[in-house]
Amino acid sequence: MATGYFFPHRHILGIDHLSAEDIEHILTIAESFKEISARPIKKVPTLRGNTIINLFFEPSTRTRLSFEVAAKRMSADTFNISASTSSATKGETLIDTARNITAMRPDIIIIRHAYSGAPHMLTRYVDAAIINAGDGTHEHPSQGLLDMMTVREHKGRLEGLKIAIIGDIMHSRVAHSNILGFTRMGSRVHVFGPATLLPPGLDRLGATVCTSLEEAVRDADVVMTLRIQKERQNDPLLPSFREYAREYGVTREVVALARPDALVMHPGPVNRGIELMPDVADGPRSVILDQVTNGVAVRMALLYLVTGNT
Amino acid sequence: MAENWLIKDGRIIDPKNGIDRQGDLLVLEGRIAAEGTPVPASARVVDASGCWVVPGLVDMHVHLREPGEEYKEDILSGTRAAAAGGFTAVVCMPNTRPVNDCRAVTEMILERARQGSARVYPVAAISQGSRGERLAEFGELKKAGAVGVSDDGLPVRDSQLMRRAMEYAGDFGLTVISHCEEPSLATGVMNEGEVATRLGLKGIPAAAESIMVYRDIALAEQTGRKVHIAHVSTAMSVELIRSARARGVRVSAETTPHYFTLTDEAVEGYNTLAKMNPPLRTEADRQAIRQALADGTFDAIATDHAPHSVLEKEVEFDLAANGIIGLETSLPLALALVREGLIDPRRLVELMSTGPAAVLGLSAGSLAAGAAADITVIDPEAIFTYTEDQVVSRSRNSPFLGWRLQGRAVLTMVDGRVTFSRLET
């Protein structure tokens, strides 16, 4: 890291706000923290006395747990709030909740919300550092970072790699964070999915939009599939899972088009047999569980950095 | 009792009567006096040097929120905002609570407007309750004072209903005003495109608007009746309207200052003050709108003044209400088009006074001798920053807060009565 660098962000709202230098710094710190989770006593005092609130407006198992494990391994005090968005027909609920939480002087609020931009709105009403744990169909920055960490761990670099992202690009906040992040780090991101799930402007975000699964996957270093949903809000996106699996599902034959040492990734939870076949998900190239392990390290790094450490 | 006024040394611009001259305008007993009429000693003098003296501005598309949502705006506050923006007349949309679909609501609006600072012309609903099922009673509404019909805010889904509305409205000399959006496509919260993708917000494609614009043009052509297309936002809509007019279809159209000033980039940062319906579009759309203002495709600049409180706007973007206030910024934003050389002052007056008056058959837009003295005096050079404390409307939901603007109304009068003034008189 260049001398004189300091991490300039108070909040982590999205990869879009992070420079290549910021990402590099986060990944380096995360890599150094990974060892903590391998110790017999998995705890360091770094964030002792910090109050961290997990404010989850959407159900989540692994992301919430991952943030909580990360916080506890750094000795922070963590509290979980699962709120329902169904009662939040008006946004005062979010603002009121945030203001009430702020009155208890937390240092970090980790928020997941069904609406894009909710974490951004929170920054206008609270003093705490905000970490976006997934907002609507916008971004999921910690997932993007842990994906980059996992790829770098296996490949030794990000620059020049071909990353194929397959599936529901439109509704995937993971895809959005990964397109921005990998592109910024010099990877070539190729995306493919049904036309109904490819939003306009992906090329402007830096991705190459492919016209076939083969084109996207051929010679790829990473094949990442996304969780698929059949329909959303009366929008007929796909006729059936059956057809999706047949036309867009990532099978062993599809993975064979990629480089021999290609990694198979998925942000989870996996619809086995639909977007990803079980033998591939559990196969030798799958790094899905490495992603989960690295998630803790990346989140430790983020907690460390937003509390003013460098 | 109206006073007598001598508005001195202004540039009098009255395109309807072919006037663009430097000089004085005399107002006697609430009416424009003929040139050369002796000035009575009682006349109060307004120094309009450096200013334009134009027929009172008309905004043919506002939401005054009364009855029902007076916490956002009411007829008095809304007409005060209109007067401050240089408007002497506003046309109010029927999506109040209850909906203006009957004589009682129309009359109540007009009764309240008698105390207001601008003339108020109500537009009544096309369908009962704006539910898109049965026609409202246009005959009775016309007699009560409605000047047009619209289910604004709610597109008329049923093509047969729209066709019947055009046919039946024509019998009473009412213009059908159409909010054009194909509802099954318009399910998003901003323009569909790169910005929506980046922000993770659901998009509304431009086709949602143009499909409906074409349907309504086809119906107007079929029936030989009139239709007015409200708040046009896309290049394709402009193209459809332009070609329909060229072949003689009786279609008129308006656009708004936000569509010729802003693009969907304004949503960046999840700015709910840039959320409206139809949504802000792309730069290519904005350029097409500007071109159509210059070439005569549009009849009017209207604001779609849509007051909302913080309860509707300081929320998650998906949940925020659509719309912005516009009465107080419309004139300065339109004057920017003049400074940029896109339109001349005569065309500006057409778009903001004569044009909308003609679409709805209002007696406005003229400084001819004997006409009611509805006059706006504009200082086209005045530079100011539009800040929250200056807002006259009850709501403050403007994306132009903090903007440095140039040109504004300095005196507004209705029937020779001053409704707004920045001048020492």
Image (spheres, grey):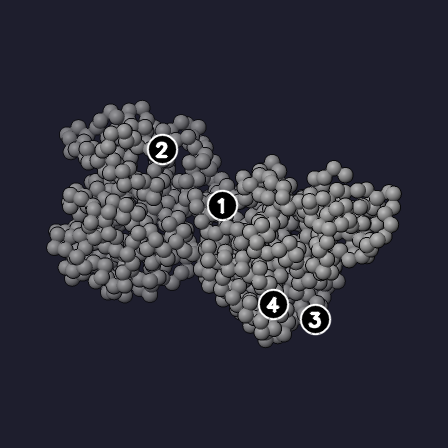
Are discs 3 and 1 both within one chain? yes
Identify the residue position indicated by label 2 in the image: A10
- Name which residue type carries label 3: Asp
Q: Name the residue under label 3.
A: B171
- Disc 4 residue type? Val
Observer able to see residue A222: no
Q: Which mark is residue A157?
A: none
| Amino acid found under the numbered disc labelled 1 | Thr
Left or right of B221 in this view: B362? right
Labels 4 and 1 within one chain: yes
Mark 2, residues whose alpha carbon is within 10 Å: few (<14), some, or many (≥20)? some
Farthest-out residue, front? B22
Q: Name the residue under label 4.
A: B251
SS for tag 4? Answer: strand
First of labels 4, 1 by sequence position:
4
Q: In this view, does A5 lie above or below B359?
A: above
Residue A145 visible from this viewpoint: yes
Same-chain status of marks 4 and 2 = no
Tell me the CA gap for discs 4 and 3. Answer: 17 Å
Specify the amino acid type for callout 2.
Answer: Arg
Answer left or right for B341 relative to B360: left
Tell me how far mark 2 sits from mark 3, CA to CA.
Answer: 64 Å
**Chain for disc number 3:** B
Q: Residue B272 carries which label?
A: 1
The chain identifier of the residue carrying mark 1 reads B
Q: Where is residue B387 in the image (x, y as percent from the top left)?
A: 58, 38
